[in-house]
Image (spheres, grey):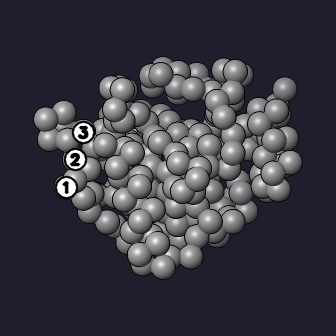
Amino acid sequence: MKVVLTPLGRVHRSVNELVSNVLARTFNSEVTVHSELSIPGECVDSLRGQVRADCLTTWLMSRMRRESVDYDIALGIADVDGYIPGLNFVFGVAFPSLKTATVYLARLRFGVSKDGESYSKFLERMIKEVMHELGHLLGLRHCSNPRCVMHFSNSVFDTDMKSWRFCSKCFRELVARGVYVSSGAVLNS
């Protein structure tokens, strides 16, 4: 599976490296980090101080196609606050038909400082949201298992409660779809 990871706006290099490594290990993926792209003005809602996640995700897919980038999955990471109409915010959004997802880091920083232990919590939340959106791109829906990465998160507290791993049911579903998933990315029963 070829994944193109695109920083949208300023995203720290260590974030891109961590996501690349996790995806490569978990899905045996070939991950390419695209150069940073500026968030287009038409996706910014200046009144809300947020970015329209549906707009940015669609824009990312169009940009990758326009550049003739070879990928199976396009993943954008933006260190901003995202939303879609009808929701106050989103941690991420995935459009499986477009094979494109975006993850928004701003709210994942809640209660986090730059010190080691606290910053680790932010990185853990980010990986959970990346894995969650990738799961959607690979055909998974939300899961009722509160420990599964595919469980819906309505807040960072929900995100903190779940694992970055797939439950056995979601793992079997991915395998049935022909997706390689490392055994280390599966919850122990």
Measure how far apart labels 1 and 3 are at the Cα level.
Answer: 11 Å
Q: Amino acid at mark 1?
A: Gly
Measure how far apart labels 2 and 1 are at the Cα level.
Answer: 5 Å
Comes first in the chain, label 1 or label 3: 1
Q: Which residue is mark 1?
A: 41
- Give the SS element for disc 3: strand
Image quarter (top left, top right, bottom left or bottom right) of the C terminus:
top right
Asked if the residue under mark 1 is in contact with the one under mark 2, i.e. CB atoms within 8 Å, the reply is yes
- Give the SS element for disc 2: strand
Q: Position of residue 8 (x, y in %)?
A: 34, 58
- Give the SS element for disc 1: helix
Q: Which residue is mark 2?
A: 44
Of the numbered discs in the image, which one, if any, rests on residue 8? none
Q: Quadrant of residue 25?
A: bottom right
Q: Residues within 10 Å of mark 2 (few under 14, many from 20)?
A: some
Q: Amino acid at mark 3?
A: Gln
Q: Which residue is mark 3?
A: 50
Q: Position of residue 175 (x, y in %)?
A: 84, 49
Q: Position of residue 41 (x, y in %)?
A: 19, 55
Measure how far apart labels 3 and 2 are at the Cα level.
Answer: 6 Å
Q: Is residue 67 visible?
A: yes
Asked if the residue under mark 2 is in contact with the one under mark 3, i.e. CB atoms within 8 Å, the reply is yes
Q: Amino acid at mark 2?
A: Val
Q: Residues within 10 Å of mark 3 (few under 14, many from 20)?
A: some
Q: Nearer the viewer, residue 18 or 147?
A: 147
Q: At x 42% / y 78%, what residue is drawn?
A: 67
In the visual, does 184 lie left or right of 79?
right
Q: At x 37% / y 44%, what residue is drawn?
A: 53
Q: Is residue 114 visible?
A: no
